[in-house]
Image (cartoon, rainbow, N blue to C red):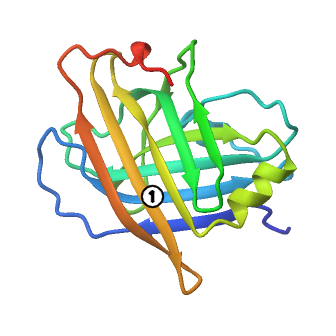
Amino acid sequence: MLDTDIKLVEVNLPSKQVKNEALVFNGCNVYIKDQHIIYSELEELSFNYLNSNDYDGFSLEVEFCFENCLEQPYHWFYANCFSIRTDNNVKIKISQSNLEKSLSKVNMHNQIVFGIGVFFRDEHEYQRIKDCNSILLEGFLAIDRYDNTFAIACRLEKIDNRWNFVYGNTYKMKKNDDIRSKAH
C-alpha cells in the first residue's frame, strides 16, 4: 500500500536526560496529511486540532518534541493561539474558544511529544505550505491544567533540500496565566 503522508520535516537532537521542570526543545516533526491516510485513533489522541475541517481532507500536523526530563512524561495538555508563518507568505492564526484536552506521548527517541493539527482552508494554502522553505510555529501549551501555560516558538528552514531546526524556545508564563485568555 502506498504511504500517502508527506513528512515535511523530522529533526531530533540528542537528549541530556536531566530531571527538571523546564520544557527543553529537542525536535519538531511536521506532517502534511491528506484524506487517504490510514486513520489511527491512538495517534489522534496526541494531537490537539485547532480548527474544524472546512476544506475536505488536507491538514498540517506538528509534533513538538521535548527532552524527557519531567518526573511524569504523560500529560493532558491544551493548545491555543497558534501562528504558522512561512517564507512564501502563508499566515495561519488560530485561537480556540472551546479548548479540547489531548494526551502527550513519548516517542521512540524518548522525547515527550505534544501535537497540534491544523486543517487547511483550501488547496492553495495546502500547496503553499508544501512548497515553503522556512516555517515559524508559535503558540501556547498548558500542561495538566489551564494555568500551567508555556509559550513555544520554533523555526525550521530548508537548506540544500534538507530541513534544519534553526531554534526552539519555550517561555514559562506568569503564575496563574490562563491559556483560555490567549487570543489573536
- Is residue 4 something one can see in this rendering? yes
Q: Is residue 79 above or below residue 20?
A: above
Looking at the image, which is closer to me, 20 or 99? 99
Left or right: 32 as drawn, with respect to 75: right
Residue 69 position, x and y percent, is 20, 48
Looking at the image, which is closer to me, 77 or 153? 153
Q: Is residue 23 above or below residue 37?
A: above
- Mark 1 lies on a secondary structure that is strand
The amino acid type found where label 1 is placed reads Cys
Residue 78 position, x and y percent, is 45, 25
- Is residue 37 something one can see in this rendering? no
Q: Residue at x 22, y 13 (%)?
A: 176
Q: Residue at x 15, y 38 (%)?
A: 21
Residue highlighted by disc 1: 28
Q: Residue at x 58, y 34 (%)?
A: 93
Q: Residue 5: name its quadrant.
A: bottom right
Left or right: 68 as drawn, with respect to 130: left
Residue 135 position, x and y percent, is 53, 58
Q: Is residue 11 above or below residue 95?
A: below
Q: Residues within 10 Å of mark 1 (few under 14, many from 20)?
A: many
Q: Is residue 15 above or below residue 41?
A: below
Left or right: 6 as drawn, with respect to 17: right
Q: Residue at x 43, y 14 (%)?
A: 180
- Could you tell me how many numbered marks the image carries? 1
